[in-house]
Image (tube, rainbow, N blue to C red):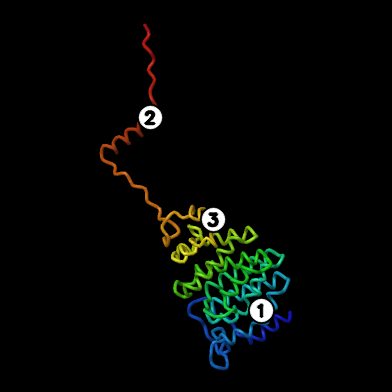
Amino acid sequence: PTVSTRHLNGASSSRSLPSNNRGHHTSAHALTENNKVWYLDPTELRHLYLPFQELLTDLRAQLVKSATATLSELSACSRDNLRLLVRDLLPDLIGLHGQTVRTIHGYGMAAMLRILGNVKTRTPGKMGFVPTLLEGSRSHKSKAARKACVRYLRCILEEWPVGFLTIGDITEIGRNLGKSMSDPAQLVREEARGVFEGGKRGVLRRKYHKVWELLMNDESLVDRRMHRTLMATCTGPAGADHEEPRKAKPRLKLTVETKILNAFQNHSANSTPTSHAPPTS
């Protein structure tokens, strides 16, 4: 076993995670000294930082896979109580996208999208989720990491409920994504552009349409050409759902005469015509 594995085992003190069922099972060995369930105690969870950090920075994909899968599963159990540990590990999770092994990118992306759906935080300052992701989308040297930060910001806008973040936070995220539309890397530009578009990916227009209108009218972020391109993808009013409901085709009311006519036509089509020989003189 590696040092990280020993640290992880020692920090958890042989405590087991609850099952995925809604009835969480709490045993005696899962309690801390303060009679709190260990996976619901933010301070206790933060003790796992060193083993997780060592596993996430390992070059072996199998260890990274195990670490991201465990962290993802832990987020489903701990929910917002995991916020301090995730906040500390966020730079390392972003750094996974700077690895040369592409499968590691997938492990990090899958884990982070699930974590952001389970864990929310309003932590102020430069160490919160949003400021760290904003900084990564602007200045990370890896274009894959910058794209991942943009994707995680979109996930926050999609998953976190309206009103959890302030309008100022949403506006700052939108401005940063607007600047990412001018990123040197095409994959970053396309990811950022999707937030402003209409349709399924256009969460800013669909969920925060007032902020979207404000940013779309800011020529320092969106030039006229980009404005026309984005507006061409918007079919419905701002704030509408991303998919228009499909209209059911009207069913024809068949009258008695129509039914008789259809039956006669079907009978005529299926019957074989008889040929009559011309009369001979």
Name the amino acid, label 3: Met
Name the amino acid, label 2: Ser
The CA span between labels 3 and 1 is 42 Å
Q: Residue under circle 2?
A: 271
Q: Residue at x 68, y 81 (%)?
A: 51
Farthest front residue? 220
Q: Residue under circle 1?
A: 52
Say if 227 sits above or below 265 in the image: below
Q: Residue under circle 3?
A: 226
Look at discs 1 and 2 and give the one toward the viewer. Answer: 1
Q: Residues within 10 Å of mark 3 (few under 14, many from 20)?
A: some
Upstream in sequence: badge 1 or badge 2: 1
The CA span between labels 1 and 2 is 77 Å
Locate residue 133: give its quadrant: bottom right
Numbered label attached to residue 259: none
Q: How many marks?
A: 3
User: Residue 234 appears at what percent x and percent y?
Assistant: 46, 55
Say if 102 sits above or below 228 in the image: below
Q: Residues within 10 Å of mark 1 (few under 14, many from 20)?
A: many
The CA span between labels 2 and 3 is 63 Å
Label 1 SS = helix
Q: Which of the pair 225/34 is nearer the observer?
A: 225
Look at discs 2 and 3 and give the one toward the viewer. Answer: 3
Name the amino acid, label 1: Phe
